[in-house]
Image (spheres, grey):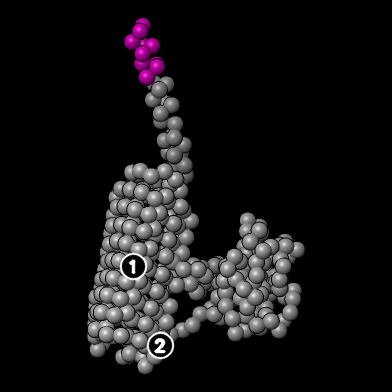
Amino acid sequence: MHTLGEIAEFINAKLVGDASVKINGIASLQRSNSNQLSYIVNGKHKRDLISSQAGVVILDKSLLDDCPTNALIVDDVYLSFAKISHYFKKQITHQAGIHPSAKINNAKISTTCVIGENVIIGHDCVIGPNTIIEDNVTIGDNAYLYPNVTILQGCLLGKNVVISSGAVIGSEGFGNARDNQGRWHTIAHLGNVVIGDNVTIGANTAIDRGTLEDTEIHSGVRIDNLIHIAHNVIIGQDTAIAANTGIAGSTTLGKHCMIGGMVGIVGHLNICDDVVVNAKSTVDKDIKTPGVYTGIMPLMSHKQWQNVGLWLVKLDKITKYLNIKLKNLKGK
């Protein structure tokens, strides 16, 4: 727990408010309480700022008049958030064996596993050799974890979950802020990964924890080998994702979707229910209508792509124009 005075000094912020207020965590504007810190990067989320219950908000001076609570005024909000996020990241020290506080019921656990503090493992689970389960993880009944699986702190797994070897659940998300010298500052990810019932996760797949809120894998999802699911992604019920697919942060996939192999899905998108994306496609915009989608283009310079894209959207008009010209020529 840190006081606002300490936090303001650490990120070199101007404090408007009570320096003695104590903060014990970070949360989004919508979900924060009086003991938590939040931040706002621009006026796009001004409505959330006005109604926020946060104990303090990091912001720039242009939004101060809309802040209903203590404020930390900085020049670069995102960079300041990146720096302070590490104040609230708990570091785990792994110790061989099963921690005395863990509740393992009748699970079959290999002697080479690491089971952390306050872990709860449901009935009839099997935990393979060299698996690491960090502090405060909960695993439902009948889970089967193959050898060399890593479940990082705070993650929640439902019943009948199967995870293949090499998978990492709750890895650090890829979030960075750049300072004036061009140096990167890593953002500590404080959310978790929440996995529903009857989910299977393939070998060497990585599912990143959320930045502040959770990454969610809903019940019945099927995830193949070598897949990367980034921070704050939500995968809807009974969706299946084939190997080598990458899903960037804060994208939501609906229910009953099928994503082919080597698909790339960019961040902050919404994909509706019952969508099929064919292999090697790139999804770079929202999909609002169920159906089958394909999008494959060769790599080229961005400037060239802008020119190509301009002509692609006009191909139907060009075709109609040429057909009319062809008919006129035949008429002559």
Is the residue marked by circle 1 packed among few (<14), some (14-19), or many (20+) residues within 10 Å? many
Front position in the image: 326 or 203: 203
**Residue drawn at point x = 54 percent, y = 80 percent:** 88
Q: Is residue 298 above or below residue 70?
A: above
Residue 173 picture location, percent across and down: 44, 69
Which quadrant: the N terminus?
bottom right
Left or right: 109, with 64 as reference point: left
Residue 310 picture location, percent across and down: 46, 36
Residue 107 picture location, percent across and down: 27, 83
Residue at mark 1: 197
**Residue drawn at point x = 37 percent, y = 93 percent:** 100
Residue 223 picture location, percent across and down: 30, 62
Left or right: 171, with 25 as reference point: left
Q: Secondary structure at mark 2?
A: loop
The reply to whether residue 268 is visible in this rendering is yes
Q: Is residue 317 above or below residue 97?
A: above
Residue at mark 2: 117
Q: Give the CA separation, mark 1 to mark 2.
A: 23 Å
The answer to which image quadrant residue 244 occupies is: bottom left
Q: Which residues are magenta?
A: 323-332
The type of residue carrying mark 1 is Asp
Among the two numbered marks 1 and 2 on one chain, the one whose residue lies closer to the N terminus: 2
Q: Is residue 315 magenta?
A: no
